[in-house]
């Protein structure tokens, strides 16, 4: 079971001090937050992708590569990578590069993005968001698994004899989570490919997420990837922790009340009652988080949203101390004790290498010499099968 | 032969106590019950007083998060055979509370359901609000407002004609309920309306695995025609 944090990268005015961090300050802060995430013993750091103010994370692989270089154990990932407005060819290239640089300490989560004006900035149309997401992933999946891809679809130019470089580390594609909270087709795609399914578990009652997670588990089994409990499920969650329940409520209330998305709406206490948000002492946060397992079954990854809504850096770092120091160690112990035998472990690069090669050496692709035309043809690597002769000889 | 009980849901956006809006809605509901009884049909009336949902309205509007009272209101509407929807007119329109409530509901919650529309106002100059404004909202929801809209300005409360119109609207609602229109439409062409997963008040949970999108989700393609390079096709 992996624990970590996810950030949407919002740059929000601190409603208590009135201070709005500059982009430079916020980007510097996220590096400190990521380093702290590892220091306090958490496993995963996830960043969102946005292409408009007030967010800073337009280039997640650049940020995550830097964080990977600053850390030793931390898995870097996204929450989410836009599978709609990014060219899947660029996703294949950039995340394979990140995989090499981080030595496999990465994966990624795909999402559609729901900001309509962003789509045309990248030549796309939100009304085609779902087929775009589905088709783009179908291509991405092949680009990481086939050295040479011929492909034709509806949303980008066709590919003939295309090789995405670098090939994935050890020729093992990065693990992919499909993030969705209301789209059965996305859950079906995750199940079809045996990928992970992630529910953000933030805005609605947990019953809302339960239905699609159950559907994903059933379909994972139907597609032959294993039993329902072997399906790979990740959950979000939102917490604010202080020594006492009262202190947590007092400190968090001004940030909650003006938070993006749900701010100026529900009372914090109502939101706590109706959604997975927990505000309270370490024990209260532990108790609430344990209810997730009861609702969704054993799962593999828990990401908390703790860096948002204008919370100042020292407060976020303190949250990490409490999360890593007092909450997660207990959760690890309790969840391990309750865990049903036969449930899957959280996938890592090492486990995926092991699954593909056993004890054998992983494949390390070495390119053939350039033929002089900068095009690789049908057999770009020394160990590629030359299934088709490039040119007939007389 | 015994018939199922008609379930009538009254939605009133009146906020004063006593409320003339509530009074108009009650009169319509009672008339429907009386007429139904004459036809040997029992009626069960559920009252949704929107004033009681006010504390939950901000979160419903800002994050589509329905509180417990909203949830109960939606559950009642899911089961409703007929609806009586009544609003006070403020500033030449149905009140914000009334409009907000119906705007929060799923688009497909009320498909085909017969509705009596009713409004109250301090002056007859608001009389067209029912037919010009409220009727459009229910058209959007694919509900079926009865031909007679009810409107009561102050002077109408002493006019016997209001009672006649209430009787007419109630008769129309009863005939539409007896016809089984809503059920027939839903049984016959539910799939041809737009739905989202979990819509219709959380009842729309069927997943069609045999769709173009599901084929695309499982590695298929949206492209028509055959691959000209597919050697297996000879």
Image: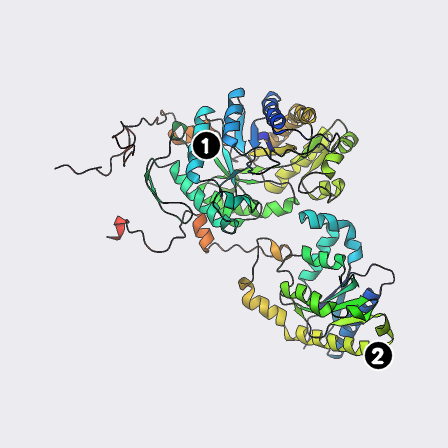
Near-viewer residue (B145 or B137): B137
Q: Is residue B28 above or below residue A100?
A: below
Q: What residue is shown at x 85% (from left), y 70% (from top)?
A: B154
Residue at disc 1, secondary structure: helix
Classed neighbour count for the residue bearing mark 2: other residues with Cα under 10 Å, few (<14), some (14–19), many (≥20): few
The picture places residue B90, in percent across and down from the top left corner, at 79, 61
Subunit that carries the residue with mark 1: A
At 56% from the left edge and 59% from the top edge, which residue is drawn? B194
Q: Chain of mark 2?
A: B
Visible in this render: residue B116?
no
Residue B69, percent from left and from top: 75, 53
Depicted A95 relative to depicted B37: above or below: above
Left or right of residue B234, residue B195 in this image = right
**Residue toward you, A372 or B156:** A372
Q: Which residue is mark 1?
A: A95
The alpha-carbon separation of the residues under discs 2 and 1 comes to: 76 Å
**Residue B45 as seen in the image, left or right of residue A95:** right
Q: Is residue A312 visible?
A: yes
> Where residue B4 sits in the image (x, y, percent)?
68, 71
Q: Is residue A113 left or right of residue B18?
A: left
Q: Read off the residue under disc 2.
A: B160
Q: How is the image coloured?
A: rainbow
């Amino acid at each position: 079971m992996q624990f970590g944090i996810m950030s949407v990268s919002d740059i929000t005015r601190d409603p208590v001090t009135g201070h709005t961090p500059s982009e430079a300050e916020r980007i510097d802060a996220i590096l400190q937050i990521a380093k702290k995430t590892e220091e306090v013993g958490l496993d995963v750091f996830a960043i969102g992708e946005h292409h408009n103010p007030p967010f800073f994370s337009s280039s997640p692989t650049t940020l995550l590569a830097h964080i990977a270089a600053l850390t030793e154990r931390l898995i870097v990932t996204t929450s989410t990578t836009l599978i709609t407005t990014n060219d899947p060819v660029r996703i294949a290239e950039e995340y394979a590069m990140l995989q090499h640089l981080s030595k496999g300490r990465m994966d990624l989560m795909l999402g559609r993005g729901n900001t309509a004006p962003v789509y045309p900035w990248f030549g796309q149309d939100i009304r085609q968001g779902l087929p775009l997401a589905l088709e783009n992933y179908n291509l991405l999946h092949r680009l990481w698994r086939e050295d040479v891809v011929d492909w034709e679809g509806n949303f980008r130019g066709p590919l003939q004899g295309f090789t995405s470089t670098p090939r994935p580390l050890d020729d093992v594609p990065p693990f992919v989570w499909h993030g969705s909270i209301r789209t059965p087709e996305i859950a079906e795609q995750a199940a079809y490919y045996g990928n992970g399914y992630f529910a953000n578990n933030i805005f609605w009652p947990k019953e809302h997420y339960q239905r699609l997670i159950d559907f994903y588990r059933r379909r994972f089994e139907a597609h032959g990837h294993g039993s329902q409990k072997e399906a790979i499920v990740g959950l979000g969650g939102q917490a604010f922790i202080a020594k006492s329940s009262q202190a947590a409520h007092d400190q968090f209330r001004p940030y909650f009340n003006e938070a993006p998305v749900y701010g100026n709406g529900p009372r914090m206490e109502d939101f706590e009652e109706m959604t997975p948000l927990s505000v309270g002492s370490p024990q209260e946060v532990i108790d609430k988080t344990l209810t997730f397992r009861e609702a969704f079954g054993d799962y593999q990854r828990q990401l908390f949203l703790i860096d948002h809504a204008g919370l100042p850096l020292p407060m976020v770092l303190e949250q990490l101390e409490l999360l890593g120091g007092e909450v997660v160690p207990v959760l690890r112990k309790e969840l391990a004790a309750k865990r049903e035998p036969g449930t899957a472990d959280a996938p890592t690069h090492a486990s995926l290498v092991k699954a593909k090669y056993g004890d054998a050496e992983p494949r390390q692709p070495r390119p053939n010499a350039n033929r002089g035309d900068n095009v690789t043809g049908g057999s770009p690597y020394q160990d590629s099968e030359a299934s088709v002769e490039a040119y007939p000889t007389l | 032969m015994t018939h199922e009980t008609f379930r009538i849901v009254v939605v009133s956006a009146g906020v004063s106590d006593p409320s003339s809006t509530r009074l108009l809605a009650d009169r319509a509901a009672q008339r429907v019950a009386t007429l139904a009884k004459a036809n040997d049909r029992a009626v069960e009336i559920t009252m949704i007083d929107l004033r009681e949902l006010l504390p939950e309205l901000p979160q419903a509007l800002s994050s589509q998060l329905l509180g417990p009272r909203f949830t109960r209101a939606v559950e009642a509407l899911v089961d409703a055979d007929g609806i009586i929807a009544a609003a006070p007119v403020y500033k030449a329109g149905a009140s914000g509370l009334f409009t907000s409530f119906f705007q929060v509901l799923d688009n497909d919650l009320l498909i085909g359901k017969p509705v009596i529309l009713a409004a109250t106002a301090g002056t007859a100059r608001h009389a067209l609000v029912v037919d010009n404004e409220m009727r459009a909202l229910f058209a959007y929801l694919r509900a079926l407002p009865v031909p007679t809209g009810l409107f009561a300005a102050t002077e109408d409360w002493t006019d016997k004609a209001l009672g006649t119109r209430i009787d007419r609207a109630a008769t129309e609602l009863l005939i539409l309920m007896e016809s089984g229109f809503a059920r027939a439409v839903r049984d016959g062409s539910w799939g041809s309306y737009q739905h989202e997963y979990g819509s219709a008040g959380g009842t729309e949970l069927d997943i069609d695995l045999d769709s173009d999108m599901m084929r695309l989700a499982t590695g298929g393609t949206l492209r028509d025609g055959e691959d000209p390079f597919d050697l297996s096709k000879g």
